[in-house]
Amino acid sequence: MGPTGTPLFTVPFTSPTRSGIHYFAVGLNWAPVNQQRDWSKPTWALGVEGRFGVGDPLHACDATGGGTPRCPDPAGTGAQRTPGMSRAMYSLDARTVISRRFGYVEPYTGIDALFEFPRSDSDFGTTNARGVLVSTPPIVGTFTIGLEVIPWERREQFQRLVFDVRVQGIYNSPGREYSELFDALGSTTAPTLRNPNPGGWMPDPANPTGGSVADPNSQKVYFTGITDQAGYGAFAAQASVTWMAGEYVKFNLGGGVRVNQAHVITAADPCNPNVTSDITTSGPCRTIGTPPQATGVPDPNYRAVLDTPGRRFSVDNTVIGQLMLSGTVMF
């Protein structure tokens, strides 16, 4: 409930069903040192992958009650949007792995970093106001330790059977994100979220020596359902079996479990202290005293009904099961 008693969303709430192609990826792996070429050296691989988001960007929608999902335009034009299905990101995934084979076993360890950059047509790109403190998705870092067991192999025919087990530690940095409440909050009718925030402040004509008011000519910042998320850790364990049928064909079957730690999903700060400002353009970001001092400028993504301590939403520990089945033809 909002402070005036207006519900932010109803329970139970149903998000729309989404399906389609998320992204197209192009990558390259290179091993400057390879144990198969030189048995006195380990295998060290470097990899980079570019991901290009395709499809319509995600839009917050309410599908409660069935029928056509209600996907309101945040600007309040009355227009309805499509639910979309893509995170609409351009991403860069960089990784390195080092391994060493000892007879039938090959232990390995590696690190991975994923950087995402929103497309201009996504709701990430609708806010360019001066005081925005966080504007990009989290950076995801992964540390992996694993072991491959090769009980059977015919090297001259490029055939082998491989069992793989691995554990991973994952860190999601603070950032803007489509959270678990993206649809519920983004499709709300509550005025506390539907009314836009000002993108800038100006001297108060009634108090030109120290007051400030919202600049009516600045960008209006509408709430889209995307929120500032606190950083959190995750842990994962996986096991799989791979059958290499030939030099260019392989099949993989596996499963795993991932545990995401509890974390806050509405964590925007009211002020951006990194942007210098004088007292006449600082809005409410000021000290109490005589004379008051500016402490920054307001973050237009801040919503008191969501981001004030005591009103923030958080996600409990989440357990995710995974099942993987793939066939690969290399050429």
Image: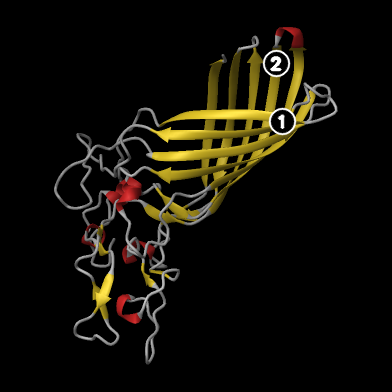
Amino acid on which the number 1 mark rests in the picture: Pro
Rendering coords of residue 329 (x, y %): 55, 14
Residue lying at 68% horizontally and 35% vertically, measured from the top left: 97
Q: CA distance from mark 2 to mark 1?
A: 25 Å
Q: Position of residue 176 (x, y in %)?
A: 42, 52
Q: Nearer the viewer, residue 245 or 241?
A: 245
Farthest-out residue, front? 32
Judging depth in this view, the residue of 42 and 79 nearest the camera is: 42
Secondary structure beneath disc 1? strand
Local crowd size for mark 2, using a 10 Å CA cut-off: few (<14), some (14–19), many (≥20): some
Which residue was labeled with disc 2?
161
Q: Position of residue 313 (x, y in %)?
A: 40, 57
- Say which residue label 1 marks: 32
Farthest residue in the right direction? 40
The x, y position of residue 36, in whole percent, is 77, 21
Does 229 sit left or right of 172 as displayed? left
State the residue lying farthest toward the left: 78
- In the displayed structure, does residue 201 sit left or right of residue 76? right
- The quadrant of the image that shows the N terminus is bottom left
Which corner quadrant of the image does residue 213 belong to? bottom left
Q: Is residue 71 above or below residue 301?
A: above
Q: Residue furthest top?
A: 157
Q: Secondary structure at mark 2?
A: strand
- Can see residue 11? no
- Residue at x 57%, y 34% (from the top left corner): 48
Is mark 2 in CB contact (under 8 Å) with mark 1?
A: no
Q: Earlier in the sequence, mark 2 or mark 1?
A: 1
Crowd rating for badge 1 (residues with CA inside 10 Å; few <14, some 14–19, many 20+): few
User: In this view of the protein, can residue 176 be seen by the observer?
Assistant: yes
